[in-house]
Amino acid sequence: MSLIIFGFLSIAFTRGTLFLYRNGNNGFKLRRRGIVITATCTDIEALDGAFALRYQYEVDGTNYTSSSSPVPMASIMPGEPLAVTYDPRQPARSNATECVGKHRILFLGLLVLLAPAAVAVCIFELLLLWAILFG
């Protein structure tokens, strides 16, 4: 039974670590090589205590639609222009310029905490499995 619990824990820690790495890495890429353009806000989505701005923009004749990271208050209304940073290598990857790199310390801190925890849980699970099979 404990092996199953630790299996779920290791999966949860690993998925959480990968999620934080991908999201943090996207922000770093946008900050490093992103291009700022003007998009049009199309909608505001209310989240739990924050808002996500939905917007459209065009790159090389192709239209893209995306949402921003959560912002504490909606300072823009649908139909208004919005500064957006997009990745020239993957134009579909974008974020509102005010959000780019905003949560990087939080992402790095959680990543530093979760990565070793995920490894520790996996090692403990392997030791527990070893004890069950050969002990």
Image (spheres, rainbow, N blue to C red):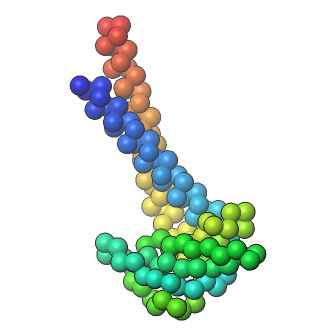
Residue projecting furthest to the right? 60
Q: Quadrant of residue 83?
A: bottom right
For residue 108, side relative to residue 86 (left or right): left
For residue 23, side relative to residue 38 (left or right): left
Q: Position of residue 91 (x, y in %)?
A: 68, 68
Q: Is residue 69 above or below residue 121?
A: below
Q: Position of residue 7 (x, y in %)?
A: 35, 31
Q: Is residue 127 above or below residue 119?
A: above
The answer to whether residue 126 of the structure is visible from this angle is yes
Residue located at (38% from left, 36% from top) = 10
Residue located at (57% from left, 74% from top) = 65
For residue 99, side relative to residue 64 (left or right): left
For residue 63, side relative to residue 98 (left or right): right
Residue projecting furthest to the top? 134
Q: Quadrant of the N terminus?
A: top left
Q: Is residue 92 above or below residue 10?
A: below
Q: Position of residue 114 (x, y in %)?
A: 42, 46
Q: Position of residue 90 (x, y in %)?
A: 68, 63
The answer to whether residue 36 of the structure is visible from this angle is no
How many numbered circles are shown? 0
Residue located at (50% from left, 73% from top) = 68
Q: Is residue 96 above or below residue 117?
A: below
Q: Quadrant of the C terminus?
A: top left
Residue projecting furthest to the front? 62
Residue located at (25% from left, 26% from top) = 2
